Image (cartoon, grey):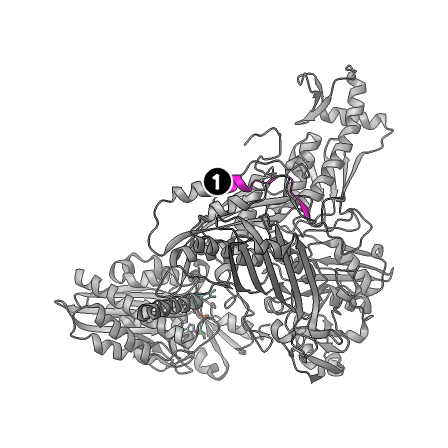
Amino acid sequence: MHNKYSVINTPVHNVDGIAKVTGRATYTFDVQLPGMLYGKILRSPHPHAKILNIDATEALKLPGVKAVVSGKDTLGIKQGIWRRYKELCDEQVLPMDKVRYIGEPVAAVAAVTEEIAEQALDLIEVEYEVLDAVYEPFDAIKKGAPEVHEGIERNLNVTRHIEWGDVDEAFDDADYIREDWFKCGGQHHMCMETRACVSSYTPEKRLTVYASTQAPYYTQGLLAGVLGMREGDIRVIAPYVGGGFGGKFELDGAMFCSAVLSMKLFRPVKIVFTREEDLIASKRRTPMFYYVRTGVKKDGTFCARESRVFTNGGAYTGMGATALYLTGFFHSFPYKWRGYRYDGYRVYTNTMPSTSMRGFGAPQAMFCSEQQIDWIAADLGLDPIEVRRKNGHTPGYEVPGQAFIGSCGLDQSLDKIEEWIKSRGKLPANRAIGISAAGFMSGGIFNWFDTPYSFSSAVVTINEDGTVELHVGCQDIGQGSNTTMAIICAETLGVKVEDVKVHSGDTDHCPADLGAWGSRQTLMAGNATKMAAAEAKRQLLEFATAKMGPNIVYDLDIKDRWVHLVSRPEKGLDYTQVVKEALRGKEGQRIMGRGFYTPHRKGMISPAYSYMVQAVEAEIDEETGKIGVVNCVTAHDCGQPINPIGLIGQLEGAASMAVGYGYLEYMPFEDGKMMNPNLVDYKVIRAPEMPECEVIEIDTFEPEGPYGAKEAGEGLTNPTAAALGNAIFHATGLQMKECPILPEAVLNAFKEKREKEQEKKNA
Amino acid sequence: MIHDFTYFRPGTAKEALSLLAEHKDDCKVICGGQSLLIVMRQGLVATDNLIDIKRLEELNYIKFDSTEGLRIGATTTHRTIEKSPLVKEKYGVLVSMENRLASIQVRNWGTIGGNLAHGDAAGDPAPVLMALNASVKVGSAQKERVIPIDDFYVDLFETALEQDEIVLEVQVPVPAPKTATCYSKFNLLSSDQGIISVGASVTLDGNACKAVRIALGNAAATVMRAKKAEEILIGKTLSDALLEEAGQAAHDECEPVADIHASEEYRRHLVKVFTKRMVKQAWEQASKA
Ligand SMILES: Cc1cc2nc3c(=O)[nH]c(=O)nc-3n(C[C@H](O)[C@H](O)[C@H](O)COP(=O)(O)OP(=O)(O)OC[C@H]3O[C@@H](n4cnc5c(N)ncnc54)[C@H](O)[C@@H]3O)c2cc1C
């Protein structure tokens, strides 16, 4: 790949890497404040019950207990990130009168030690009136089912409709139509750092909150809303964050309860979820039932698709409304459909709410779509790669009424994966390769929060010695965004990465930004950073031009701390010297650049889209149903890579999560109770199970992205489960319609297949 | 949250046993803590006194003698066994078993004595040791005794240990000539405990099976012998039909319980598959021995 850049596309270790590996990095979990108390949350044992009375008398008698709060100590405001839409703000973090899932917070205690706080929980007496509960969307949607939220008919929380083209006519044109039902499970975000928060309210009527959050600005805004405060009186500090994966941009119990307790006591209160609390009460990937009907021509040309989805929404909306939309949109990806119709139904149930998680509905969509495409290809005797090539997105394509596709490396990705598959030669029995294509948004254009701020902002300030302060509101949650921003800033300004100090994760000192979700930071905060750095550079060059006095038709630039004439790079000035002198010339005013990014006229979803084709090589033990994933190879178009090692980290992290989703991670519930709320029984991929994860970068340039970059990290979770399903299909002929694909199900499918074959023989 | 306790760290086994005799009604022995700490954190075990035997060097040994066989002291870690050239040479199956027991971190702390005493039917060492016809030497302040491992497990998480006894040593006899032992577990993550596991030891006389011991892990409340399957094999020569019959017998005689990881029927099926595989593998190895 060409490298016309000095910093971009050169491997850079994370700017916070040393602090992390030496243990100096302070996570919320590590925060200790003088006079700090410890909070614990009492949780509902019932999936659905009225709260009749809460008696904390005995708990308050326990020495060391400082306060107990419940819904009636709060303003009772129903909150949610969809602030524009009141009906989707449906969650009181401490409910006033009713609990809707097992694990829902009911009361919170603050005490001088964690042990005392925990003991106090046992002393709080809650009187419940247990109500009938409902757990599955197809039960909850029935007439007469228990109402999770009063007055919401058939428990229908949100519906979404997407349609383009004349769908029925396009189906009429099809030579072959296939329909299938699929079921995709939930998945837990499994952040290394569980939900954690330290809140400190002081007599100045200001609240400081240390929170493990993906979006400090959202935390600030949401807290202001539920506490009846001004946003500006709340400071949210997100020190280091131990993972988010889509599960940490809503208001959580740790944040809300610690804030309410601290406001009552004027003392800092810390709440850290145990792993079990995190598992049962922090939301999850949305479980989905998918009906997919697809019509194609004999030669594999796609005509129409019609899909219906029913999701298990759990007790509250969370980010589920967006997941419902995005699953429907990405279910069309990355193909051109003459007619496309999608109807999504999000149904409330008495289970832990479902929400966004890495991929935001797309992994489920791909599991169903991409497997069905392979089955159709097999039904018609077509090559699955050829079918994808025939129908895939191309640069400049418009998804009718939805999206404009700029750069698109799908075709090249298919070529590269085809080559890789060929290079594997003949595989042993019960082993095969399956592929899946996918794409993803590169920055969600969603302003549900209805903020008047730009989506991303950045401020670049240059110190007299040439070092740079970069203030951004985007949040580093381990994905390396601070490093990405440092690289973009250094590249733009013409300095070295080590010259840039990145400041993020503090709403008092950093400009607002919507945060780390929707694969938005590289593109949006990256553009804001680039703009801010370019503005600062412009001021320096103004001075340098005056000083060097070239003909004004000549351009000046800075590279590697050298201010020079573009046409004669040897002619120039030392960057640090220029900074010093420029300051003098400005009466000491700092050189400062501001940048922002807000999308306009970029379609409904995103300014740009990443593309990829992934091949998963898997082997299946026919006697036990066990699946082993050998290879997970991705041809990946993420535009211009910013940091090659960061990219590998994202790719491997995504693979571990997505392979886990494919055959391992699942959340069984019985009567609303999660059956495996611990890391012994909830299985997560470990090092020995990690497949080889080769990546083949596809060289594209995205005009909307900073230096041509697009998202790289979230979208990579989309194709894997589907590709694994296809590998199983090609190895065994089994069509696995439920995700995760568990060995017992594979074994049963084998049995069924054998019985069917036997029947055929007998007939 | 872990219940508060008084912590004792005796310097000798003798001291440990007298402390145990003194506190036996309310006390727990801790060795590597890899199992105990989990249940203490979960609040399933709350004790006022904890006796730490981890540093009893006198119980940390691996010895071999061509008549007595192998002796492993109770405080020997999994990792030490795994890395022992002696064990590798004489009882290779123990090394391959240890290799897949948990992670290196856990193996560095967890001990053979603690593992056996914990009495988890899903533990790895017990079925292998049962296939190897091992015994467990236990002792109290009063006396020592040797319990065949077949009799060591009484019920779910319950062993034949008296309240004032600890495990001192594992004893593995010298295998008969033309004997091989194999072990494998079925799991989705290679370092997990088995959804089921099977250990099989086959001794041949010419082409025929002279003796066989099959032990099933996590297929009942305790590790168990698959005696019906064994009976089927004795005196026979190897064939697919024979393996199928023995596997089916193990399938029928085990008593697995369903949980979220596997139904009862699936567990039985896996017992059958792994019984067939392990017997076959041991048989083939024995014939080459
Ligand atoms: C993440 C993880 C994964 C694991 N995976 C596996 C696995 O795959 N396979 C497997 O077999 N095990 C596994 N284990 C369990 C673990 O390896 C063993 O149970 C452990 O080795 C027990 O040894 P310990 O020394 O740590 O015992 P401890 O935890 O200290 O004690 C366990 C029990 O034995 C008692 N005890 C300890 N020593 C003695 C003694 N000498 N005499 C009498 N009683 C005693 C204690 O009182 C306690 O009841 C796993 C554990 C963890 C944490």
Residue A150 position, x and y percent, is 75, 76
Q: Name above or below for residue A732 compared with residue B223.
A: above
**In the image shown, does A502 or A518 lie closer to the viewer?**
A518
**In the image shown, does B252 or B289 lie closer to the viewer?**
B252
Report the magenta residues as a range: A403-415
Q: Residue B67 lies in magenta, yes or no?
A: no
Residue B242 position, x and y percent, is 21, 72
Estimate how packed mark 1 is, as few (under 14), some (14 to 19) or many (20 or more) residues with alpha carbons within 10 Å: some
Q: Can residue B140 be seen in this view?
A: yes
Q: Dot 1 corresponds to which residue?
A: A415
Residue A650 position, x and y percent, is 57, 48
**In the image shown, does B128 or B78 lie closer to the viewer?**
B128
Quarter of the image for residue B236 reads: bottom left
Q: Check the picture and name the quadrant holding the C terminus of chain A.
A: bottom left
Quarter of the image for residue B61 reads: bottom left
Q: Name above or below for residue A349 compared with residue A235.
A: below
Residue A466 position, x and y percent, is 73, 31
Looking at the rendered structure, the kind of residue marked 1 is Asp
The residue positioned 57% from the left and 51% from the top of the image is A303
In this picture, residue B75 sits left or right of residue A330:
left
The residue positioned 78% from the left and 49% from the top of the image is A512
Q: Which quarter of the rendered image does ligand 1 occupy? A: bottom left
Q: Is residue B126 visible?
A: no
Q: Check the picture and name the quadrant holding the N terminus of chain A.
A: top right
| Chain letter for mark 1 | A
In this picture, residue A278 sits left or right of residue B210:
right
Q: Name above or below for residue B174 compared with residue A631.
A: below
